[in-house]
Image (tube, coloured by chain):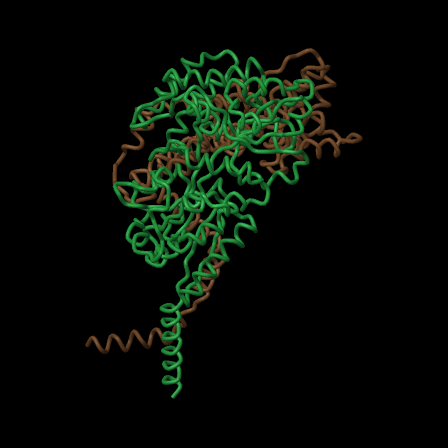
Amino acid sequence: MAAADDIEAMARRARVPWLTLKRREAIEAWLFVSPTLIGFLIFFLGPLIAVVIYSMSEWNLLSGEQIFVGVANYRDALTENPDFWHVIRNSVIFAIGLVPMNMALALTLAISLSRPRRGVVFFRTVFFAPVVTSAVAWAIVWKFLLQGEGGTVNQLLALVGIDGPNWLREPDWAMAAVIVTRVIKMVGLNMILYIAALQAIPRDYEEAARLEGATGWQVFRMVTWPLLAPTTLIIMVITTIGSFKVFDHIYLMTGGGPENGTLVLAFYVYEQAFEFFNVGYASALAMIMFVIVLVLTIVQLLLRQKGAT
Amino acid sequence: MRNALTSLTVSALALSLAAGHAMAEDLRFTVWTGNEAHLNMLNGIADGFEAENPGTTVTFETIPAGDYVQKLTFQLAGGNPPDLGWMFEDSMPAFVAAGAVESLTDTLENAEGYDLADFSDPAMGLWREDGEIYGVPFSTSPFMIFYNKDMFDAAGLEDPLTLAEKGEWTLDKFREVVKALTKPEDRIWGFEFKDGQGYDTRIMHAVMPPIRAYGGDAWSNGECGFDDPEAVEAVRMLHEMVFEDKSIVPPGEQGDYFSGSSAMTINQISRASKMPEAGFEWGIAPLPTGPAGEAPVIGQAGLVVFAKSDNKELAKQFIAWMTNQENVEVMAQFFPPARVSVLESDTFTEANALIPPEQMKHVAAAIKEGEVLPSHERAPQILAAMKPRFDALWRADSDVEASLKAVCEAIRPQL
């Protein structure tokens, strides 16, 4: 009986080709997405799962000893280690300093450079160039310019009678210097986003407002600014996320100093993992950073949905 | 027929691979020099070993010094361990404590004609633990004063070498000449810390020479020494030189000795390789003496075999080969030796093409008398804990003693 069933099943298989159109399409689809999928699994999902596991262990890289410690690393960071909150504070100060300055400057530049005028392309290029400049070269040159007495910045300030501080050696000034140099480097990107948004606003709106007797400021406040809101929101969130991930500037310009004044989260993770080889603790910190960025991203998505409706 | 042929081919291939594996032993050796002259010398030493051990090859792999410990650690942890390598003095205790390096005692004691006792005891101190030898120093290099002779001549001052020969090269004299050579209007300073890094990565190299000359130490036996009166006095002197005399390149400024912006600096003789292109007359002298007399400070680097190596025995034999009398003499042209017989021979004082013998004899003396920098199993954590407190110290208005007390407080848990 069973044999008869088998024969029948085999016959059925023989009649219907295995590679139906549906199957073929499915295979093709998988093949098309597989390069990205494989990359995603190997370089994103795999490490992410590994980091979660590492974050619950104490792992001495040199001896290879790995002990499961549960949530001890998280508890250590959040409740016991005063450095952690100092680092979070620095990251927040960095974001609060960087985001508004970056956005205000980007908007100002965009408004000045959105209309087709002579030389506008040249200036857009000038302000965008730092974005594509090597971050390493940028940081090293600024470190040189910001030297104490011999630095170009202080020599220029001396010309107008200002005795500039030793920028990168005093905690508060170092933070300010890192923020400002970062803004100058990255503002071009937000400027381009704002220019695109400004150019998408129909000219009729402005003309209508002007016919009603609105002044330039009123046109901006009542017409342009509200219409820029969705772009402003996106720029704000991506700039905030970017500011939490800042590493290269800190590493090259201050190394987290002086007096830990510029020790921000991404640099702290690096220091714990690659200088002290505290892989477990560093992984826990990386997870905390991941959650912070994830929350910001979700907020961005929710706000965008709200903006769309 | 075809199957038989295939299986024959496969077996032959497998056999040849297995045989090849059994015969050829490749030792992978990590170093932090990329200097061609250094690598040529190392390869020359390896050639001799390969000739004595047919089928063996030694490959030197350069990892830049700044990333060395980091990359090495990740190679060891990631299952791609080198067989042997160079090791920094300050990283050694952590590697020994973790069991990441092999004991070399048996191999060195039994190597033919090796004469282990020829290595000076103080030089071996750092590489020995509980009677076992875990590393052999290949470079035992004291910190020396490099001076710009042209600047001394122009100022009509006696240079440090002359002063040292007369026994007048003291810290007080040092402070006096450093101040005399400073020319703020030309942005020229009397002294620059090692590679201009004295406030950052080279804190220990900046403060340890005067602290030792005053009779203090950074720490010993788990006790912090930075806030002892001797250390406080020494650091106060440096602080006054930076902020009152304004004669040492201050934090946040660049005043490179090698390009003529500082009259003196402190460094090891390997840096002499930078001098021919400097364009001025120069010389080296011992460190100035202090209230505690002469206190030379030594930096060391050693050779180790990694516990995860697949060829431990062969790797150990290579270390014995590399540090035998003959090869230590060869290496002495770049790396000051820890073998007393080589140190005392003319070979060493005449080995350096850039530094004349009358200056090299001070190097040899410093190696014999000197003490290595303090080390610790948790050195990276200690340095990181120290750094912010030293940042606070290196400000014009800081209280030196309070700052050093803060340093001790910060590093005590790590000690």
Expressed as whole percent of the image width and height from the top left, the position of residue B364 reads: 47, 38
- Depth order, front residue of A36/B324: B324
| Residue extending furthest toward the bottom | B1
Is residue A85 positioned above or below B350 on the image? above
Tell me: A232 left or right of B130: right
Palette colour of chain A? brown
Residue B123 appears in the figure: yes
**Residue A108 lies in quadrant:** top right
Q: Residue at x 63, y 20 (%)?
A: B182
Residue A53, visible in the rendered structure:
no
What residue do we see at 32% from left, 27% from top? B220
User: In this rendering, would B55 be left or right of B246?
Assistant: left
Q: Position of residue A134 (x, y in %)?
A: 61, 38
Residue extending farthest front: B166
Examine the image and state in which quarter residue A212 appears. top right
Q: Nearer the viewer, residue B290 or A217?
A: B290
Vertical order, A131 against B353 (above or below): above
The residue positioned farthest toward the left in the image shown: A1
Name the image quarter holding the N terminus of chain A.
bottom left
Say above or below: B21 vs B250.
below
Estimate the x, y position of residue B61 in percent, counting from the top left. Answer: 48, 52
**Image position, residue B148 (x, y; %):** 63, 30
Which hue belongs to chain B? Answer: green
Q: How many numbered marks, from 0 up?
A: 0
